[in-house]
Image (cartoon, rainbow, N blue to C red):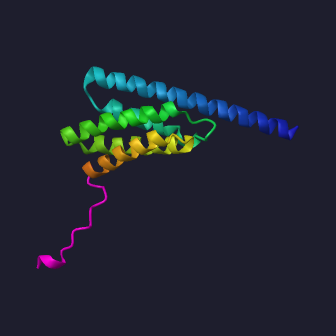
Amino acid sequence: MAIVNKLTLRREHKSATVELASLNREMALRMITLANETGEIMPLIKAVKAMRSAEEFYSPDTAQIEDARVQKKLGDVLLNIGKNEDDLSALEAAISAYRSAITISSMLGAHKLRTETRKSYALALNYAGKGQHDQSVSLMGAA
């Protein structure tokens, strides 16, 4: 009897996780619409947070590629705002969105999306001043 209860609980957990991810995706899409209507970036930042809030519950069985695509799109919009308006909060949110998209696409084996997102992630890090610095230039002969 305990095995049946355990299996039932696992099924219910999986179902609740899928539902939570779907609700967070829906809320994120509404925040994107709000941002388009108002021209403000805070709804976009909240959309990233909404999407990431369910991430800890993702597994290969419950994660959906659409979540990664939404996060990538959010990251792209926030990256453009951040670099064009010199807005660090937008860049930080873009970095967070890209991380999530990379995690989900890696989990699901979506290599093309993962590669595209990693490039955007590196670009966002550079604009935020957190990217890898090219250390191939030697200062030895400068003196």
Front one among 133 and 56: 133
Q: Is residue 44 magenta?
A: no
Front one among 119 and 29: 119
Q: In the image, is residue 89 above or below residue 129?
A: above
The answer to which quarter of the image holds residue 59 is top right
Is residue 74 rendered to the left or right of residue 18? left
Across and down, in percent, residue 101 comes to: 45, 40
Q: Where, quadrant-wise, is the N terminus in this rendering? A: top right
Across and down, in percent, residue 115 comes to: 42, 45
Is residue 90 rendered to the left or right of residue 68? left
Is residue 40 rendered to the left or right of residue 17? left
Identified at 45% across, 43% down, the residue is 114
Residue lying at the far top of the rendered structure:
37
Label the magenta part by its dominant secondary structure. loop
Residue lying at the far left of the rendered structure:
143
| Number of marks drawn | 0
Identified at 47% across, 36% down, the residue is 68
Across and down, in percent, residue 127 comes to: 25, 49
Across and down, in percent, residue 11 comes to: 72, 33
Residue lying at the far front of the rendered structure:
112
Q: Where, quadrant-wise, is the C terminus in this rendering? A: bottom left
Identified at 56% across, 40% down, the residue is 108
The answer to which quarter of the image holds residue 76 is top left
Q: Which stretch is magenta? A: 128-143
Q: Is residue 140 magenta?
A: yes
Identified at 28% across, 20% down, the residue is 37
